[in-house]
Every structure is written in structure tokens, then in C-alpha cells.
Amino acid sequence: MSLKVLNPNAEVLNKSHALHMNINAAKGLQDVLKSNLGPKGTIKMLVGGAGDIKLTKDGNTLLKEMQIQSPTAIMIARTAVAQDDTSGDGTTSTVIFIGELMKQAERCIDEGMHPRVLVDGFEIAKRATLQYLEKFKTPVVMGDEPDKEILKMVARTTLRTKLYEALADQLTDIVVNAVLCIRKPEEPIDLFMVEIMHMRHKFDVDTRLVEGLVLDHGSRHPDMKRRAENCHILTCNVSLEYEKSEINAGFFYSNAEQREAMVAAERRSVDERVQKIIDLKNKVCADNDNNFVIINQKGIDPPSLDILARAGIIALRRAKRRNMERLVLACGGEAVNSVDDLTPDCLGWAGLVYEHVLGEEKYTFVENVKNPHSCTILIKGPNDHTIAQIKDAVRDGLRGVKNTIEDEAVVLGAGAFEVAARQHLVNEVKKTVKGRAQLGVEAFADALLVVPKILAENSGLDTQDVIIELTGEHDKGNVVGLNLHTGEPIDPQMEGIFDNYSVKRQIINSGPVIASQLLLVDEVIRAGRNMRKPT
Amino acid sequence: MKEIVTIQVGSYANFVGSHFWNFQDELLGLADSPESDQIFKSHGLNMDVLYRTGETPQGILTYTPRLVSVDFQGSLGSVSSRGTLYNEIPETPVDTLTWTGPVTTHTSQPLKKNLFLQSLYLEENANLGSSRGCESENSDSHTEVQDEDIVQSLENEVQYWTDYSKVHYHPQSLYELSGLWSEINDFNNYGIGREAFSGGQHAEEINERLRFFVEECDLPQGIQFVVDDSGGFSGIAGEFLENIADEYTNIPVLLYSVHSPDSGMDSRNRKLAISRKLHDAVSFSKLSAFCKLIVPVGLPSLNTSRMSKYLCLEDRKPYHTSAVYASAIHSISLPFRMQPLGPSAQLSNTSGAVKIKDLVQMLAGQARQNMVTILDIAMPAPAFTGTQAQQSLLEILQPLTPEIAEGVEDMQALESMTVHGAFASGMQKSHSFEVKDAVQAAYLNAVERPKFSHLSIAQCPLPIPLPFPSIFGNLIGRNGELLDTPISESTSRGSLEVHSVPMAARLRSSNAVLPFLENRLANLRKFGLARGALGTELLRNWGFGKEDAEELGEALSNMVTTLNPASLESSDSD
């Protein structure tokens, strides 16, 4: 309250108010996201003020679409989004877990417990849970040839929470194959080497994996071939545009001939560069009917395109920077920055290059490549919101597969881990803790159950029945998860329901940290803030 | 062809941009309309420089601005970010194809379209209708009445920049930043914008959109970049510009950093005031690092400036003030679109074509190589002969750049002026050579003369579109001529009374801009660099360590010394 003396304009919330503000914000956020969770969750359709539609089941996307104002909610949301950035999934779970921890804490605090003691209990429980997770995880040996089945199971688990089953199963293969395609032994996986391209065209089930690359532009000359087989690919970053020389020569000429001469001289250096490329083409395509394709990161102006077209070369300009890397990985060869020392070794190879036109949008497919280390997932869908939703799901799937390969471990899903960890905490850990911190451990343990609870709730099952049945089975020593169709316990191993180890670890790590911080807040001060409404 | 890609970043930049594109749209409309004046029909401007031709999936041809615009989520008001051109026949009801489970729908309250947007919508439908049959004749008088209501409603109700936009944008053009989670008022410094941009997918997506437009260009002449530098958007623009400089090395960027009049207020709060001063310094230093020519635009108050002699502007309405800035940017951009002609071009409608690269070379490439230029305009431009001629054009040009010195003598000043639609005397449009002579005469009589001056002339005045705000005073006639006696009782006249306005605009590289630079440098040194300065912590929060901050200061002080070599000694001594 001393702040009031210092600054009479400051708004101060005292202890219990501050705490309840935080708890309510956390619960509110949980309420918004909880119906998203799991393969039986609800998809949300957001219709904006101007009639724009967004369709999402992804916690991360939903959080970004919401215009969150409460500072507490923002703090939680940032943690959840950071969760997505680091491990690619688990946004919804993080928010729900934090919300549940706060809910449990509220109960204890109302009974007169001090937040400090509660937080100590959380800390003990968190460490115990993480240790238990190490024991609980299922190790997967990756080696040179990863077990495709286990990767598929992880991908399917993620995708089925985002898309309907048939489509999810179709994408499972695509996602796993894409990651295996770009994977190189002894190197971290760079998911950027999977291009995700979309076409507003046909149906979602036409989504496919292109081994090779799809570029979102085409050649800019009417005489260039729209389809070519057996192509040498030149990946380069060389300007083929006419530029005025830096000293402003253009200003000083006294007649038309002089001007022409000036322009011609400036033009010549570009033409020489083009000629060098044509020379290379003639060299490699001399005694066969192979084709030659240039994909350039810089611009190519119409006269250069003209010359190239006459030489029978297909030229694409202003390629994405990332595609330079991808092309080399997909087709071989190397990306050149100058045309001075071109050799046939610089060239990549593709069996087929063709163009696909949809209205004003052009796509160039570079396919039938040898031994690709880069590929494209081509998403198709009838409208933008469908495409956006599939794209989100594909991203999550890719991250899931990558995590599995890097973790070399998975965790049994369908709520099995949460129930097992809870039983572990209540039956084993709690006894080793002295004093009131026990209650903190218990609160933490109960909060873990929120995942199976909400899974059950979203499937229209009775949560209490489900939890009793699950904990009963666990006490008998059976590790079981929840069958969302029947409400019966199932063995996630048999059903192939696996979650990412790193995602789970991250959730258990970050959830209690935020919850503890929020619980220890005893004053909220808004000082010197400008409360004027935006115009 | 030499294409320009336009980029608008930030709320106020989009307000300015919306007016700018309205002018272009009006020019296009007037060129096609049978009733319009001859000067609009053959304006001699190549609109393809700013616009692109496209095709919808249904095969309908489109002509849309080559534009990337970035703004807050929800800043588009009642207009969809995808525009309406490329919409397929709406599938009703919208079904969720990707999920078989339950669906919940959250529908925001649909925003009501204002009268102007409603009338645009009706007109479009009527156009579709009239191709089938005709029933339009009798509705003419009806629309006449409505126009006044529209102008009135715009005057009072404009809230979003889309409210007065009559242009169709390409679906790739409008980008909304989602997931900022900060109130608009808190999005007020360089650091927060930089953070928002570097974190998520935004950077990639925005760069992709720019690439979409650049890829289509055969030979881009430059990028015209308008940024609202009063808040976090300059952080976004800074990162974006850095990327552009990296990716498109030989495409010059002409940067207008615009500032709305009210953004300087509320300086009672000391902390906020320091933050704002530091922000201005940092953002100017950062933005200027990645462009070829920077034009700071935005007076602290337009209403109390000398502009108010002919214009009645309300400072608190961005709809009003942005119109003036947009007019100036329009005038400056005219030479980029003129067809270059041989020496015999004296009689054509335009003369003095330059490309962005040439302009940069002219103003920042010669002699002192100062890249900070001052923007001056005369709106409306006076007639060159006759009664008003005694009032020199040069005196009427008013700076739109803040914090500049007046009446300084600069022997090395460089200028580029554009005059369009000017009258010779009375109602007679003047020819290029008359304008040329008049300007030359003006310079001869002037006390200070620039070292170099370039003049571009177009016959076509600034067309005033219907959604233009009523900002003209009662001394301005129907075609923008200056009157000796007030024409009517009412003080402000809008698009219904004034149809076009002659304009003169000038970019000038002069040491008059020194105070602007020195203020920023001094603020940065005082609050950010000095030992124990109040803002060091703030700068660190924005992601500038000690060395970064010193680098920013270095850049600013270099700009000062290019204009004023004497300052080098003075700054060394303290």
C-alpha cells in the first residue's frame, strides 16, 4: 500500500485479489482451450468482423488469434507458444495443465495454506515426475534405419488430434517419408528442407508428397517449354538484369546514337553472363536431347529471357532463398554465385520439370530426382481455411517425427503417463515428503489427471468413472490409457498411441514454473499506465 | 518497363496509402470515363508502374496495386484481408471438411459497412446488372443526393483506413499481424516491434508476399516504402528493410517515414517521454541504414502550420492529415511513371521523367551524399502568371518534414521538384515550358539558390476522389484555382465542390534538416549513451546492447557531419 503514497494514481490489487485475478485468468484460458484437446475435441471456426473464416483445432493458432488482454493470460499464453516453438506441440496441454494447477492451488489456499508451501510441494513433485518420466519412457533405437512403424504411430497420434482419421492416416505416411527423406546421419534434422506448398485446387485428399521440389512461380517467357524431361538444373544467384552503371552515364548524351551506344555497352555485360550459361548448356546438351533449366535467385530481365528461350533454356527468376538450398539437396550440383567458372559439375539433375497453371498462379514441379535430400509436401484443398488447417497439422506432424528421432524415445499416450505419474506421486513420493508440502505434491498429482479427464469429457464420457477405472488398473500394475470410443481402459502400446518425450518433459517443466510464479504474486500494481482508449 | 513495388507498414502509413491508392484509382477511372477532361484522358502516365495485371481462377482479368501492407489484426475494419476480387462463388453453408468431430463457431459481430462502402458495393452489383440489361437512368438523381451523405458520413465516422478506400487489393497485399497480445497503445517502441517480427512466422510470410510481387517485375526500378515510425511498426519495418537490402541488393528503396500529428503528445509522463525520444532516435537511425533515401514526414501539428491558409485540417483526424501527405507522395511519384521521351518532348503532357534510382543518385549520390531529404509541398500550387504570380512559388512551398531550420543558406542544396496541373493564369492550364520558365525565374529571384535542381512537369492535376476529406478552404475553386474572395460561407470544401487541385512538391537535400538530425543524436546521447543515462536499461530491453547503441549513435553523427563538417570538432571537444 506504500505505493499509494508515492503515486496516488497507481492501481493496486492486494493479496487475495491479486491471487484470484491470476487464478481466474488461468482458469479462463483453460476453459477456452480445453474443448480442443484430443482426437474427440471440438474444432473452432472463427468468423471475423469482415466475414473472414479461420478454422483451427490447434491451441497455438487459437491463442494467436485471440486478442488476449489480461496480463496473466498473456504470461501463460507466451509460455504455451514458447512450448510450441521449442517442441512443436503441446500448447493446449500446457495451458490446461497450468490452469489445473491453479485450480488445485485455489482449493488449498482457500483452506488456509500458504502459497509458499504449496509452491515447494510443486517443486518436489515436478522433480519426482521428471525422474519418473525417465523411467517410464519407451526407448526407441534409431540407428541408420529408424523404425518406420513407431514414427508412423507418433505422427498418427498427433495428426488424428487435428484432422479426421482418413486424412490423418494419409498424411501420416507423407510426413514420415518427408522427414526420412531429409534426414542425414549424424546431422540435426532441418525441417526447413521440407517445403510446404499449397494449391487452392481439388480436395484435401489430393495432398501428396513430391520427391523433389515445387516452386510457386514459373518461367516468364511464352516460348519456354512448359514440360521438359531429363533436365540439367543450374541453381544460381546471379543478376541477369540490365543495370545502369553507378556513375550516372545516362544523363549526358547529345544525340540518339550516343544514347543507343551507351545502352548497348551497359547491356553487353549482362549478355556476356547469359552467353556463358548458354555455352555451358551447349556443352552438356551437345549430343543428346537433354534439357536445361536455370533457377535463379536474382532477377532475369526480358531481353535475357529472350536469349535464353532462343537457346532452348527454361529460366525461372527470383526463387526463394531457401529453395537454393533445397534445390541442391534435391537435385545435386551446387548453387553458383558467379557465371565465371561454370562447369558441368555445378549442375543438378531432374527427370521431369513441368509447369502447372491455376489462374494467375504458376507452379513449377521439379521431379524424378536422384537420391533427394529435400522434398515438398503439396497441400491441396478447396479453400483457404482448409489449407491453413492442414498446414498446421502437417507442421505438427513433422515436428513430432523429428522429436522422436532426436529423443530416441516415446511416451505412452492416451493419458497413460499422466495416470501412472499421479499414482507414483501419491503412492510413493508423498510419503517421503515431510509436513504440509505433502499437500502441494498431492495437488500437483491431481492436476496431472486433467489430461485424461478432459479427454474423457470431450468424448462425452463420465470423467469420474473413467478416472476410477484407470487408477484402479494402474494400481494393479497395468499401464493403461483411455479408449475414447468406449471409455474402457486400453493398452496404448497395442493401439499405437504415442506422444513425444520432449513435449511431455517440456510441459511438466514449464507448467509448474509459471503456476508458481503466479501463485507467489501478492500485489498487482498498475502504475503510470495510460488508460486512454485507443482511437 | 520499370515497376515500383509499394510497401506500407503501420496504421498511419496505411491511412496515407489508402488515400494514395484512391488517387491512382481516380486517375484510372477518369482516363476511361467519356465525360472527363482531356488532360485526364491522356495524362501521359504509365500506371503499370504501380499496378499489376492478374487473372482470377475464373479467368476474369484484374488490375491491382503492386502493394504489401502490414497492419494490426482487426485494422481492416469491415473489409476482408483477401479483398473481394478473387473470391470464388461463396459455398453456403461453409462446411468443415477436415474434421468429423464437433464444431463450435465463434462469430464476431459483423462490422457495419459505412455509407461509402455500401455505395461501392451497390455500384459493383449494378455494373454486373447493367451488362445484362439497363435500368440505371432514373437512379442518377438518387445517387446525387447520396454523395453528400457519403461525404458527411466519412467526415464523421472514419475509423479504419479501409473505410474510405475504393480500391480493390490483391489477396496477397493486406497482411494482418496476429498474436501480438499487446494493446495498441503499448505497441509504442522499436523493441516491441522488432520482437514481434523476429519471433514467429510473420517475417517469413511478409517476405514471401513481397517476393510474389517482385518476381513478376521485369525490371523493378525501386521500392516505395511508407512506414508509420511512431511506434512498434518501425521495428517491424527495420527488420523488413534489412531483409530487403539483403535479398534485393540492387533495388533502391525510397523510404517515407510518416508520423501522425497526435503521436507526439502526452509527454507529462517522464518515462514515456524518454522512451519516445529514444524510440525516435533509434528508429530513424535503424531505418535510414537500409534505404537509399529517407524522407521524414509528419509535422507535430498541421492545423497550426502554414498549410492552414488554404486547408482546414483537424489534427486529431488521421483521415484528414494523411490526405495531405498522400497528395505529396503522389506528386513525388509522378516522375517515376512518366514516359521518358527524346529531346522533342517539349509539347507532350509530361516532362522530366526520372526513375527512383536516378532520383536517389541526384539527391543522395552527388557531392555531400546526404540521404535525408526534406519534403515540401504547395497544395494547391498557385498560378504562374497573372494576379497571383507575385507570390513566388518558392515561398508557398511548405515543409512537411518536422524540426527543420528555416531560412538557412546552403550553397550545396540539391532539389527535385514536381509541378503538375498548374495554371498559367486564370483557368488556362500552363504548358511545360511556361512552368519551366516560371520556376527558373523564381529561382533567379530567390535569395537562396540550390546548387542543382531538377524539374518534372505533368499536365494532369491531382484528381480529388469522392472519399477525399473536406479539407479545402473557401479560397479554393472548383479546379483548385486560388480565389481572391471566399467563394462560400462554409469554411471547408470537399470532393463535391473541388474536383482537382494543381500541386507542386519538392524533395530537397539541404542542411536545413540538421536540427532534425541533431535532436535525435542529442537525445540518444543524453538518454541512451551517457554514463548513467536513464534510458540505457530501456535500450537493452529493446535488444540494443552498449555497442549496438553506440553504433546507432555513430550512424546519426555521421549523418550530421556529412551536412555540417564543423560539428565534428565540437563533438570531439566535449
Image: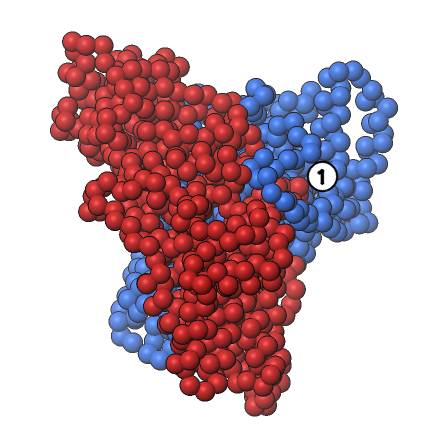
Chain colours: A red, B blue
- x, y percentage for residue B445? 48, 46
Residue under the point 32% across and 25% down: A366
Side (left or right) of B340 relative to A62: left
For mark 1, what is the residue?
Answer: B117
Direction from residue B550 to residue B434 in the image, left or right:
right
Asked if residue B545 shows in the view, the reply is yes
User: What residue do we see at 42% from left, 62% from top?
Assistant: A477
Q: In which quarter of the image is the C terminus of chain A?
A: bottom right
Image vertical order of residue A406 relative to residue A269, above or below: below
Q: Against B86, is B484 above or below?
A: below
Q: Which residue is drawn at 81% across and 22% down?
A: B136
Q: Observer-nearest residue: A292 or A123?
A: A123
Q: Where residue B346 sits in the image (x, y, percent)?
A: 48, 24
Query: What SS does tag 1 mark?
Result: helix
In which quarter of the view is residue B37 placed?
Answer: top right
Give the quadrant of residue B468: top right
- Residue at 54 percent across and 67 percent down: it is A100
Query: Foreground residue, B141 or B107?
Result: B107
Looking at this view, name the residue that lies furthest to the front: A476
* Chain where mark 1 sits: B
Sort mark 1 into few (<14), some (14-19) or many (20+) by Cα contacts within 10 Å: many
Identify the image quadrant of the N terminus of chain A: bottom right
Residue B241 visible somewhere in the drawing: no
Is residue A202 shown left or right of residue B38?
left
- Residue B389, percent from left and from top: 60, 42
Residue B62 image offset from top left, x and y in percent: 57, 25
User: What is the three-letter code of the residue carrying label 1?
Assistant: Leu
When the figure is inspected, residue B569 is found, relative to residue B375, above or below; the finding is below
Nearer the observer, B377 or A84: A84
